[in-house]
Image: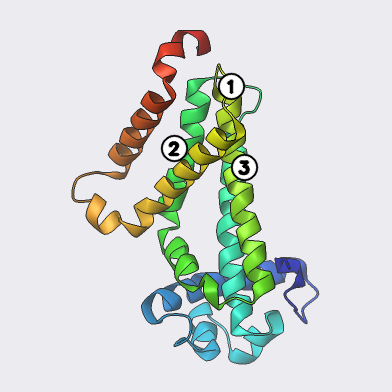
């Protein structure tokens, strides 16, 4: 399943995209406040700025809206990562820029991230599998930038573990921000996480080779 398979009676794809983006924004606020199951499609329509009849021109069920929310998160992460990852540049700064950009995007989308992890279990099995594949794609992009930035070779398992650690650290800012903000600004949090990563990978020892 992908978002193109969510039924719509509207043929204008630009309009479909616009209306569904409105739904995503409205639904995220409601799902965070009330939860997926307690939110009605009528409430989603109202929060999106159109009627319940119009809503059903663009989706089929409330689960479709949740799917679109989840899909939107990973599409935006993928776009942001592709913008900052330079696979032709082998440098510490390239690695840092990719990770910093990922963390900043998660901060921008913290409500969406929280909603997705709270409610993804409500999606049909095929949609859950699609979302999980999207997550794997995002982790794989981190694996590639790590691999490209290191002056030495890691095993596949080591690379996967480090990429997953980075992925979770970004999301941790969303889930634990209420506590972390007592001690860190976002920039401080990112800097500390990057410093720990550099120390773990011992990149400071190779910095002169990678400039």
Residue 154 vs residue 115, the one in the foreground: 154
Relative to residue 194, is residue 18 depicted above or below? below
| Residue at x 53%, y 71% (from the top left corner) | 120
| Residue at x 60%, y 80% (from the top left corner) | 63
The mark nearer the N terminus, 1 or 2, is 2
- What is the spatial separation of the Cα atoms under label 2 and label 3, in whole angstroms? 17 Å
The image position of residue 23, as x and y in percent, is 56, 75
User: What residue did someone put label 1 on?
Assistant: 153
Q: Secondary structure at mark 1?
A: loop
| Residue at x 34%, y 28% (from the top left corner) | 195
Relative to residue 105, is residue 31 depicted above or below? below
Residue 52 vs residue 86, the one in the foreground: 86
Residue 72, by quadrant, is bottom right
Q: In the figure, is residue 115 to the left or right of 131? A: left
The mark nearer the N terminus, 2 or 3, is 2
| Residue at x 62%, y 62% (from the top left corner) | 131
Q: Which mark is residue 100?
A: 2
Relative to residue 46, is residue 202 depicted above or below? above
Image quarter of the N terminus: bottom right
Q: Residues within 10 Å of mark 3 (few under 14, many from 20)?
A: some
Q: Which mark is residue 57?
A: none
The single residue placed furthest to the right in the displayed view is 11
């Amino acid at each position: 399943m992908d978002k193109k398979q969510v039924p719509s009676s509207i043929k204008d794809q630009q309009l479909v995209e616009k209306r569904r983006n409105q739904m995503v924004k409205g639904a995220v606020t409601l799902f965070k406040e009330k939860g997926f199951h307690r939110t009605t499609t009528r409430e989603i329509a109202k929060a999106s700025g159109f009627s319940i009849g119009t809503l059903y021109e663009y989706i089929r069920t409330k689960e479709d809206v949740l799917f679109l929310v989840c899909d939107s998160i990973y599409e935006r992460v993928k776009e942001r990562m592709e913008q900052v990852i330079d696979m032709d540049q082998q440098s510490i700064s390239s690695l840092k820029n990719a990770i910093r950009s990922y963390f900043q995007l998660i901060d921008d989308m913290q409500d969406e991230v929280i909603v997705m992890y709270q409610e993804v279990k409500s999606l049909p099995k095929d949609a859950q599998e699609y979302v999980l594949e999207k997550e794997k794609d995002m982790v794989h992009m981190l694996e590639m930038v790590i691999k490209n930035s290191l002056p030495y070779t890691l095993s596949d398992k080591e690379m996967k573990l480090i990429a997953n650690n980075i992925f979770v650290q970004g999301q941790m800012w969303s889930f634990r921000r209420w506590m972390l903000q007592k001690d860190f600004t976002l920039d401080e949090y990112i800097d500390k996480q990057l410093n720990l990563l550099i120390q773990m990978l011992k990149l400071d020892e190779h910095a002169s080779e990678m400039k």
